Image: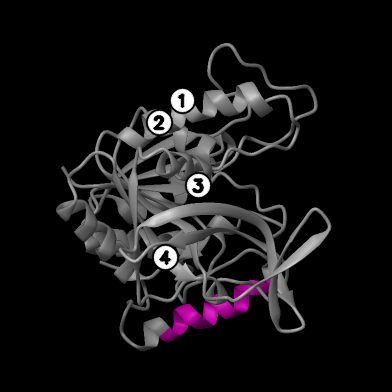
Amino acid sequence: MKPTLLILAAGMGSRYGGLKQMDKIGPSGESIIDYSIYDAIVAGFGKVVFVIRESFIEAFKERFEPRLKNRIEIEYVFQELNKIPDGFIVPTGREKPWGTGHAMLMAKDVINEPFAVINADDFYGRDAYLQAITFIENNKETNQYAMIGYALKNTLSEHGTVSRGVCDVNANNNIISIIERTKIGYENNKIFFYEDNCKTELTGNEQVSMNFWVFKPSFLEALNSGFKKFLHDRGSELTSEFYFNTQINNMIQHGEAVTKVLQTHSKWFGITYREDKPFVQNSILELVKSGIYPENLWKD
């Protein structure tokens, strides 16, 4: 059975000012998602699962089903605020769903094979998908996972702060710990993360998670248990988020998982702010000119 690509695409694009998942980036109107799926098909993935809001469904079907027909299997699952386990309630006043861990859990009933998870608005490069497939083929243990790693300095935006899972890695390229830093940015050509009115300088060489991970189905079961604990502890908070990075870090700390960093020569780029778009468009165009991608991605 071929692996699945799980795409987290339920964000509303509040900082961007619209549905950046659908924004035209490539020379023939392709979005970043188009390039991600194209690379995944070339690498050997057999199914794509979109995690979206239910209100996005018609737009996603209209855009992707004609392009992907007979190329890869498609599934849709919905991340909504009220989709939480029995016994818990949504606190009055909460407006947004519960974060990336919650988003992944929406797919637990449609994924029964090894899978990779990515962000909809991040470009990872074909080598990242090839490395994911190679890892899956060579690592059969249910608790062996992997992360595609990028150097922090190559993942920032000049237009505002970003969130990154900063990793501590041992000599075997296995992750020792992951700390979610929600505000990282430039200040006077230096890199800092900001927390509790304090700032701490970073080197820029830290390995960070860009939310491209390779998991086995066992992780979804552990994630489900972790989400219930999160709701018990923090479910009454109006803006708390359940990150799947936090769950995998907990498993690493307790010896329940081994997670290897797969360093890729592919260049990452993404769109957090609308001002990031021209750089991403130019980067894609350079890849088209160099022959990595056709000018019209889905032309038969």
Q: Secondary structure at mark 3?
A: helix
* Residue type marked 4: Gly
Q: Quadrant of the C terminus?
A: bottom left
Seen from the viewer's position, the closer of residues 202 and 270 is: 202
The colour scheme of the drawn protein is one colour
Q: Secondary structure at mark 4?
A: strand
**Mark 1 → mark 3, Cα distance in angstroms:** 14 Å
Q: Looking at the rendered structure, which numbered label has been put on residue 149?
A: 4
Rendered image quadrant of residue 297: bottom left
Which segment did they paint magenta? 275-286
Q: Position of residue 280 (x, y in %)?
A: 54, 75
Q: Secondary structure at mark 2?
A: helix
* Above or below 30: residue 4: above
Query: Viewed as shown, does residue 144 lie left or right of 107?
Result: left
**Mark 3 → mark 2, Cα distance in angstroms:** 12 Å
* Residue type marked 3: Asn
Q: Are marks 2 and 1 in contact (CB under 8 Å)?
A: yes
**Mark 1 → mark 4, Cα distance in angstroms:** 26 Å
* Residue type marked 1: Ser
10 Å crowding of disc 4: few (<14), some (14-19), many (20+): many
Task: Work out whether mark 1 precedes mark 4 in sequence or the reverse, and give the earlier one.
Answer: 4
10 Å crowding of disc 2: few (<14), some (14-19), many (20+): some
Seen from the viewer's position, the closer of residues 240 and 43 is: 240
Q: Is residue 31 magenta?
A: no
Residue that badge 2 annotates: 222
Q: Secondary structure at mark 1?
A: helix
Residue that badge 1 annotates: 225
